[in-house]
Image (spheres, rainbow, N blue to C red):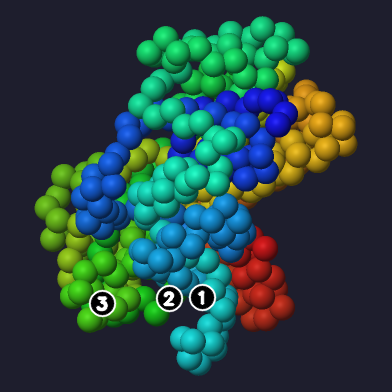
């Protein structure tokens, strides 16, 4: 066994998936995660509650989770809501985009992706990380933070110290530790930030009408409003299926903060009105939360013996729900580049600077394009110039024309699925 050691810092979905990919390929890897270990009974307790947040997993992300034997566990749990259509529309405007499968029966519909709560994915990943077939190649350290990182040179890599004084020597350090990445900061990698001056309000709602396996997004003058299918959890839910949605409602920051001061019923009523009652009245609302919106991009994804993936490298506007999917594409690209160059070197070179730079050239331009595209869409519908009549006319005519071009709509559906 070749001891070309990789240390992944951050055990979220992206970091854990990369750890599994490497361990399955019999490449030694250590995964360090600051969150504490949960017992199975503790997992079941936290999973009893519906989470208002969901990840909109593309088919590319689902296929990657299948490859590491995690999606099978998610599917068995039934805590997922597949969707076969996406609907995008604007209020007080012309045009609607409806792309995806338009088959008459549910059994014939082709899945575009699936909405899954974060904790459901994390639980499935955690179960997989403990399985015997990868235990010879994978070490998992939970409940510990990295306190120090010292670069020892290209040949030796990094010496990493945890808060319990454990020291790990790693040829390659992978930063998968989120937007406020400690790894990125210690590597002195700068960050480009675009503050949207918007806040996202998230909640779970039960609507009068079913979602019919359709992910919906209204482009409003105040920002985007997404209505995303949620899995049915309780027996009561399953007796009346497809009525729960996850909401991500983007508003100007001051307007969002004022709305959050209101009682739940008022928020629900204003939300139903903002959606133009697309799914009827809102009967129940749960788990209201909020966070400020900003896009960011690391100035570099790599340095000697160190590489960034997922939110540590980039963060985009949530209007297209692609943040995690971009991170999963990072995982596949980094894995492919690492293993390809390792084999080409005769199993001698792991995580060289050239390898990491090739990964960066593959992913950073694509992620930059996505980030700026989402920013442009946000500006086109909700920016300060969005309500000028020429912009409205261009936007309305564009949506109307695009919606009439069936091959283009099929292309959009394929792009949304990620495959």
Check disc 1 and report the residue beneath it: 84
Looking at the rendered structure, the number of numbered marks drawn on it comes to 3
Left or right: residue 371 compared with residue 234 = right
Residue at label 3?
Answer: 238
Relative placement, left or right, of 399 versus 34 is right
Q: Residue at x 37, y 38 (%)?
A: 292
Callout in the foreground (3, 2): 3
Q: In the rendered image, which residue does mark 2 sit on?
A: 213
Figure quadrant of the N terminus: top right
Circle 2: element type:
loop
Residue at disc 3, secondary structure: helix
Q: Do tag 2 and tag 1 residues touch (Cβ < 8 Å)?
A: yes
Occupied quadrant, residue 164? top left
Disc 3 to disc 2, C-alpha distance: 14 Å
Residue 220, given in percent of the width and then of the height, sits at 42, 60
Q: Residue at x 24, y 44 (%)?
A: 42
Q: Classify mark 1: helix, strand or loop.
A: loop
Say which label, 1 or 3, has the lower sequence index: 1
User: Who comes first in sequence, dot 2 or dot 1?
Assistant: 1
């Amino acid at each position: 066994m070749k001891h070309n050691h990789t240390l992944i810092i951050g055990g979220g979905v992206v970091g854990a998936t990369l750890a599994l990919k490497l361990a399955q390929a019999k490449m030694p890897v250590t995964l360090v995660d600051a969150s504490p270990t949960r017992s199975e009974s503790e997992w079941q307790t936290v999973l009893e509650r519906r989470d208002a947040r969901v990840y909109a997993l593309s088919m590319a992300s689902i296929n990657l989770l299948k490859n590491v034997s995690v999606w099978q566990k998610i599917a068995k749990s039934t805590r997922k809501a597949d969707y076969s259509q996406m609907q995008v529309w604007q209020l007080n405007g012309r045009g609607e985009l409806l792309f995806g499968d338009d088959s008459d029966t549910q059994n014939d519909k082709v899945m575009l992706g699936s909405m899954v709560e974060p904790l459901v994915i994390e639980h499935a990943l955690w179960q997989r990380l403990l399985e015997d077939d990868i235990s010879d190649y994978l070490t998992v350290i939970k409940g510990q933070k990295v306190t120090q990182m010292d670069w020892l040179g290209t040949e030796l890599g990094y010496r990493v110290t945890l808060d319990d004084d454990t020291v790990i020597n790693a040829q390659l350090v992978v930063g998968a530790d989120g937007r406020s990445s400690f790894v990125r900061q210690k590597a002195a990698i700068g960050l480009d930030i675009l503050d949207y001056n918007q806040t996202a309000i998230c909640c779970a709602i039960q609507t009068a009408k079913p979602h019919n396996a359709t992910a919906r997004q209204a482009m409003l003058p105040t920002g985007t409003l997404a209505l995303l299918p949620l899995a049915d959890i309780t027996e009561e839910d399953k007796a009346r299926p497809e009525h729960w949605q996850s909401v991500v409602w983007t508003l100007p920051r001051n307007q969002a903060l004022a709305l959050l001061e209101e009682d739940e019923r008022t928020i629900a009523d204003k939300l139903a009105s903002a959606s133009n009652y697309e799914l009827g009245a809102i009967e129940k609302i749960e788990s209201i939360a909020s966070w400020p919106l900003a896009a960011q991009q690391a100035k570099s994804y790599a340095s000697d013996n160190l590489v960034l993936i997922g939110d540590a490298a980039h963060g985009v506007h949530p209007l297209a729900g692609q943040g995690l999917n971009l991170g999963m594409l990072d995982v596949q690209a980094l894995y492919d580049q690492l293993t390809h160059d390792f084999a080409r070197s005769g199993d001698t070179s792991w995580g060289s600077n050239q390898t990491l730079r090739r990964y960066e050239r593959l992913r950073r331009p694509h992620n930059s394009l996505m980030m700026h595209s989402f920013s442009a869409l946000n500006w086109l519908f909700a920016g300060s110039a969005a309500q000028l009549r020429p912009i409205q006319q261009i936007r309305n005519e564009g949506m109307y024309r695009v919606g009439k071009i069936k091959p283009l709509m099929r292309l959009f559906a394929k792009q949304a699925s990620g495959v």
